[in-house]
Image: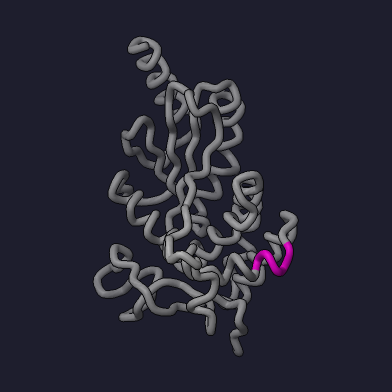
């Protein structure tokens, strides 16, 4: 199959901590680094050479007594289940009442996961979580086929969220942002060394995947502790 310019491929720059026994899940065997568009490895380079800012995407009050991080990969089926079964209840019971600050952090175990993150961030902070929901809702569809098929399916999700083809082209060819996202991911792994996805972190305690009932119990305990300390 001929791969056109929209298909993200690997080009130069490093993604150090992402190797695994000589095989990088993001890079493939013995291939230098990250996942940039074919023929556009230098596209969207910042004029001043500064790396783009990779914002933490969050829901809930900044002064909430408990902070909950979720680490997730867009290609992880268990993460899709968490977003369909657990997150809506978290929003209703803890986030909207101002009890919990929810911070979502992307994990890049594979190339399509990074591409999905680039599309999700293309809509900015206001549209980010709406696009994330679409990516998880349609996960079984867009992870199928060739890399070109996956990218086009992600572009279709972006268009559904109101992004234009030009906007999506700019985001998916932003080499500097791709590098910055990889660097942010690596830095986050130093702070919270998770072993799989989804993983939750409550007030900096790293925990694994769990049911809503179990997570709710831990959040209630954290809230009681915060109240006692307050």
Is residue 82 toward the left or the right of residue 208 in the image? right
Q: Is residue 167 magenta?
A: yes
Figure colour scheme: one colour
Instruction: Give the magenta range.
Output: 164-168
Is residue 24 toward the left or the right of residue 215 in the image? left
Residue 190 vs residue 138, the one in the foreground: 190
Report the label total.
0
Residue at (34% x, 56% y) in the render: 186
Classify the position of the N terminus by image quarter.
bottom right
Is residue 205 toward the left or the right of residue 146 in the image? left
Whole-percent x, y for residue 155 in the image? 67, 66
Using the rendered view, name the quadrant where residue 90 is placed: top right
For the stretch drawn in magenta, the main secondary structure is helix
Whole-percent x, y for residue 206 in the image? 32, 38
Residue 96 vs residue 41, the one in the foreground: 41
Residue at (50% x, 62% y) in the render: 113
Q: Is residue 10 magenta?
A: no
Whole-percent x, y for residue 28 in the image? 38, 77
Residue at (39% x, 54% y) in the render: 184
């Amino acid at each position: 199959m001929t791969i056109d310019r929209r298909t993200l491929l690997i080009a130069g720059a490093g993604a150090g901590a992402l190797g695994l026994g000589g095989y990088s899940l993001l890079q493939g065997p013995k291939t230098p680094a990250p996942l940039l568009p074919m023929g556009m490895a230098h596209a969207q380079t910042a004029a001043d050479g500064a790396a783009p800012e990779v914002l933490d995407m969050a829901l809930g009050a900044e002064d909430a007594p408990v902070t909950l991080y979720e680490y997730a990969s867009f290609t992880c089926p268990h993460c899709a289940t968490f977003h369909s079964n657990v997150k809506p209840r978290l929003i209703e019971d803890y986030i909207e009442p101002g009890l919990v600050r929810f911070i979502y952090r992307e994990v890049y175990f594979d190339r399509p996961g990074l591409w999905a993150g680039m599309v999700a961030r293309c809509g900015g902070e206001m549209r980010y979580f709406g696009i994330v929901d679409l990516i998880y809702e349609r996960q079984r569809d867009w992870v199928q086929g060739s890399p070109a098929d996956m990218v086009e399916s992600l572009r279709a999700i972006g268009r559904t969220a109101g992004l234009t083809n030009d906007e999506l082209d700019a985001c998916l060819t932003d080499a500097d942002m791709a590098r910055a996202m990889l660097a942010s991911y690596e830095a986050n792994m130093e702070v919270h060394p998770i072993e799989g996805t989804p993983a939750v972190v409550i007030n900096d305690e790293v925990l694994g995947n769990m049911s809503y009932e179990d997570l709710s119990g831990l959040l209630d305990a954290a809230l009681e502790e915060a109240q006692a300390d307050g």
